[in-house]
Image (cartoon, grey):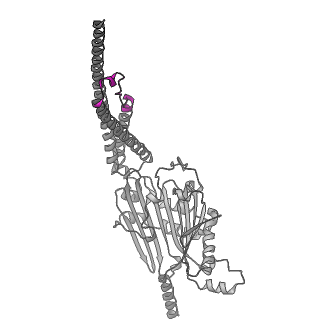
Amino acid sequence: MAGMVGSAVVQETVSRITSYLFSKCDHDKRTASTGHHIERLEMAHTELELALERSARMPITDVSLLRRRKLLERAFKDCGDLLHRCIKQQTMDLIEFEQSSVSSYFTGFCKDNISYSDVRRNEWFAECANRFLRDVESGCSPLRCVFSNPLVWQLLEGKTLEYKMVQGSILRCLHIQSMCVEGRGVEATLEFCYEDRKTPMTSFSLMLMLRLSESTDIIGTAIRCLQSFTSSMKDVAEAVMRELTQLPQQDISHSHAASYFIIKDLCSYDTHFWRPDPLCCKPDGCPTSYIPSELSCKFPEQVILIHIKCYVSAFECSSLHNTANATARNLVGHWPPLKLEVGFAPHLFQECMQGRTSVEIIGGKAEHINDSLQQMDKMVRRNAINRYICQPDLMDYRMGWNPGHGAAYSSASKVDSGFETQRAAKRRRSKLEA
């Protein structure tokens, strides 16, 4: 009986040892398989990284390529996260294996943490990245731009264009700067300033931000945007369009300059602010990831921001023409013009403004109001006059319209002392000439 028990113990021991050896052998095979999968995953990750790094320095002008790059960015991140988890789990498995007893391997706790399908999926993305890079390199060939608009040709080469013309008391200045932004393609800022020293009231400036492609007509796009301005801005918009159409584009395309900004108020802003997601809408104007709004389809899809600054008569802006308040009429009648600014950002998105369609900003404080986009421009002029009469120290009145996707803003501000000095000088010249 004792012999039978002893034999059984020996047999059980041999069985456990054999099971452990087979388990360890299986563990080694699985470890080798996992290690090979991780190596393939690392290679796919570096292929994706290479494509993204090289394309970041290239002027991508095709929206389809920008969308494909966005998909590859997501694949690169997912691949990196998976790779990190697998390496971490492999290290933990090895430590646990070394610390475990023989009996813990009867159930075979070591499992393959990365499947073949995971590897193949990321390798497929790496192959797509290689094709993407070839498409970008062929698309960025200078030969594609030879027969395009000469302004765009220069801008896609990274040149800054500037044109100045002085005609009597009038100064016309155009400045166009382009920049290649990773994940956003080539974006440009156009600034046009018209200044009349004799009649400062007729002076104005325009800023346009947009994404460029080889087929972009930047002056034509600016005119299309101006045609969308409300009726109360019609006279100014027509004056800007008239000046833009008369600009000699051939001379502009051969005039290069250093980079600077004319409109100082917007110097600190960039295209990331005005359009956080550069691919939020398809070229046909239908949003892909945001709720459609009036503004998102009102302007060409590639437009990021359009901004006009001009001057308007304070008395004409007020509602005092037919009132009996002679004191108020006389007061406003002697005011200098107001600086009026109107801007549209068709793709601006701010979480903090959700549910606050229209706001007025007085002294830095925003309050919700009930006004439509069509009323905003008229309301800002009238409300500004009323506020300035009641609050003489107030210098700036603003209104904003945020439908959710896109935004519009308008302000009517008191002009600085420089404008008053120009008007006084003009009056003195008129008296001398008389």
Q: Residue at x 44, y 52 (%)?
A: 215
Image: magenta residue range: 99-120
Nearest the camera: 178 or 253? 178
Residue 216: % across, % down? 45, 55
> Taking 214 as reference, is 9 left or right?
left
| Position of residue 217 in the picture relative to residue 405 (left or right) | left
Name the one closer to the observer, 40 or 17: 17
Q: Does the magenta stretch include residue 317?
A: no
Q: Can residue 346 be seen in this view?
A: no
Q: Is residue 49 above or below residue 415?
A: above
Query: Looking at the rendering, in which quadrant would you find the N terminus?
Result: top left
Task: Please tell me how many numbered marks the rendered image carries.
Answer: 0
Quarter of the view holding residue 14: top left
Q: Give the answer, above or below, for where 34 lies relative to 11.
A: below
Q: Is residue 286 above or below residue 267?
A: above
Point 37% across, 39% down: residue: 79
Q: Residue furthest front?
A: 2
* Residue in the foreground of this view, choosing between 281 and 366: 366
Q: Residue 68 appears at what percent x and percent y?
A: 42, 43
| Residue 112 visible, this orientation | yes
Residue 426 in the image: x percent, y percent?
50, 87
Q: Does the magenta stretch include residue 111?
A: yes
Q: Residue at x 66, y 84 (%)?
A: 329
Question: Which residue lies most toward the top here?
Answer: 1
Can you give x and y, in whole percent of width and height, for residue 162 in the image? 38, 67
Can you say whether 272 is above or below 237 in the image?
above
Dividing the picture into quadrants, the one containing residue 264 is bottom left
